[in-house]
Image: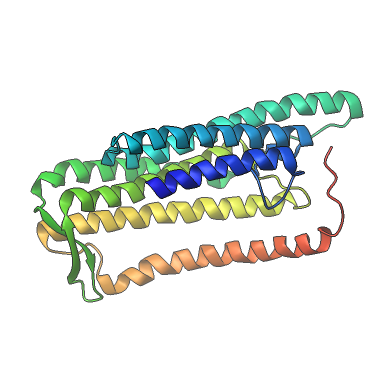
Amino acid sequence: MFVFTTIITIAGVLLIVIGYRLKPSLFLGFRIGYAYISRYTWRKLNIYSGISFIVLGSILYLLIFSGLTPPILLIVLPLVLVAILIGLTEYGARLAEKELIRMESIEKVEYEKLRSIEAGFIPIAIASISIPIFIYFLIMYYPLLPEKIAIHFDIKGKPDLYADKSSGLLYISLAFIVITAISLFFSYLSIKRPESFYRPIIPFTLMRRIASAINILLSILIIVILLAFVDTICYNVYRFHIVRIEFMPIVILVPLFIVIAYIVSIATKIRKIYREKLGKQIVVH
């Protein structure tokens, strides 16, 4: 927790420095699409995001040094981070809207509103099914679990790592909550704020594709973690696996590999565009 808090705090300081010192960058800073509207929005968003992370880091330091770091904090913290990111995105959207109105009045230029990215609905659909299943198994089967549970298995399905049930389920729950929170955050961006994926010099069609692929990738990860959780419960209570262990790499790795390969192919195209255009000055109003 101390290392994570330090990273958050240092990131906040760096964002403030970037906001004051650097021009809009494709590689550094709080790089949501709204930040690229103008130098003014870039500076404001980076400074405000930096302040937000420093405040969060300061609160976490107080909790750490006062000894108030209950396990529930590990679960709540990802939700707090997502809430902060949503707040910063909404602030960026309002800031960009005002800045565009000002720029349009000066330059007489109209800006097209980007339509939602439909793949953003996939994590919402997956999460709406997965969350009730996860909660049901956690509540109904926790009392039935032994104090020591198997949390990892070899290729033959035999347990090779044990933990007490509280800590074992805590870390599985944490992984599920983190991935689900990130997935829903990307859904929010894709559906409500697709402009967040805008990047100068990159065609938005490519950014739509990579955003869609990320939404699908996160949805697959939700399913994988839920599957691992339910399988762990079933083995420790009933001594059977819901999916044969030897088939798990195929079930998990094949869809992940396909989506990751697709993301890499798009990233390669984006890299090519960078190489062709980074020699030219990026004009930011």
- Residue, x 24% and y 70% (percent of image)? 244
Viewer-nearest residue: 14 or 200: 14
The reply to whether residue 116 is in sight is no
Question: Residue 246: horizontal and vertical position, in percent?
Answer: 28, 74
The reply to whether residue 96 is in sight is yes
- Give the position of the C terminus as an image quadrant: top right
Viewer-nearest residue: 255 or 57: 57
Question: Residue 275: horizontal and vertical position, in percent?
Answer: 78, 64
Question: Residue 166: horizontal and vertical position, in percent?
Answer: 18, 48
**Figure label count:** 0
Image check: 112 left or right of 196? Answer: right
- Residue, x 69% and y 54% (percent of image)? 206
Q: Is residue 161 above or below residue 206?
A: below
Q: Is residue 228 above or below residue 107?
A: below
Image check: 169 left or right of 54? Answer: left
Q: Is residue 273 above or below residue 73?
A: below
Occupied quadrant, residue 93: top right
Image check: 202 left or right of 83? Answer: right
Q: Is residue 210 above or below residue 107?
A: below
- Residue, x 53% and y 64% (percent of image)? 260
Image check: 79 left or right of 99? Answer: left
Question: Residue 220: horizontal and vertical position, in percent?
Answer: 43, 56
- Residue, x 85% and y 27% (percent of image)? 104
